[in-house]
Image (cartoon, rainbow, N blue to C red):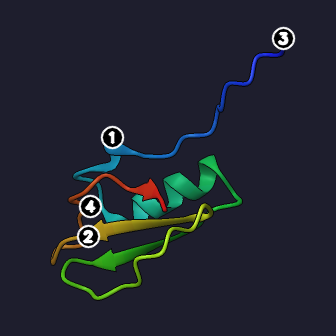
């Protein structure tokens, strides 16, 4: 039977505390097929799941405060 492990990351907890633009660049460098962008704390957004999207949540100082993840 073939080994069917998924090797792509789905979340980046190591980016908590990093500047948002650095986090976006890091995620894009790891997976070019993802649409990655920052979202400011308190912003309104749609709740549907998208398997090619990563929201990078940043605080008022532009620092990641929640682990980015696909969705």
Give percent across and percent down for residue 47. Answer: 40, 77
Q: Image check: 27 left or right of 40?
A: right
Q: How dense is the environment of label 4, judged by Cα within 10 Å: few (below 14), some, or many (20 and up)?
A: many
Residue to which mark 3 is pinned: 1
Distance from Cα at disc 4 to Cα at disc 2: 4 Å
Tell me which residue sits at (32%, 43%) in the image. Answer: 13
Residue to which mark 1 is pinned: 14
Distance from Cα at disc 1 to Cα at disc 4: 10 Å
Tell me which residue sits at (23%, 64%) in the image. Answer: 63
Q: How dense is the environment of label 1, judged by Cα within 10 Å: few (below 14), some, or many (20 and up)?
A: few
The quadrant where residue 64 appears: bottom left
Give percent across and percent down for residue 4. Answer: 74, 24
Distance from Cα at disc 1 to Cα at disc 2: 14 Å
In this view of the protein, which residue sits in the foreground, 13 or 5?
5
> Which SS class for mark 1?
helix
Q: Residue furthest front?
A: 1
Distance from Cα at disc 4 to Cα at disc 3: 41 Å
Tell me which residue sits at (65%, 51%) in the image. Answer: 31
The mark lying in front, picked from 4 and 3, is: 3
Residue to which mark 4 is pinned: 64
Above or below: residue 32 compared with residue 43: above
Residue to which mark 2 is pinned: 58
Name the N-terminal-most of marks 4 and 3.
Answer: 3
Give percent across and percent down for residue 48. Answer: 48, 75
């Amino acid at each position: 039977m073939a080994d069917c492990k998924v090797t792509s990351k789905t979340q980046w907890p190591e980016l908590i505390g990093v500047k948002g633009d650095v986090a976006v660049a890091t995620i894009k460098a790891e997976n070019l097929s993802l649409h990655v962008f920052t979202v400011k704390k308190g912003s309104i957004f749609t709740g549907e799941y998208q398997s090619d999207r990563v929201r990078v949540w940043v605080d008022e100082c532009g620092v990641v405060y929640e682990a980015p993840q696909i969705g």
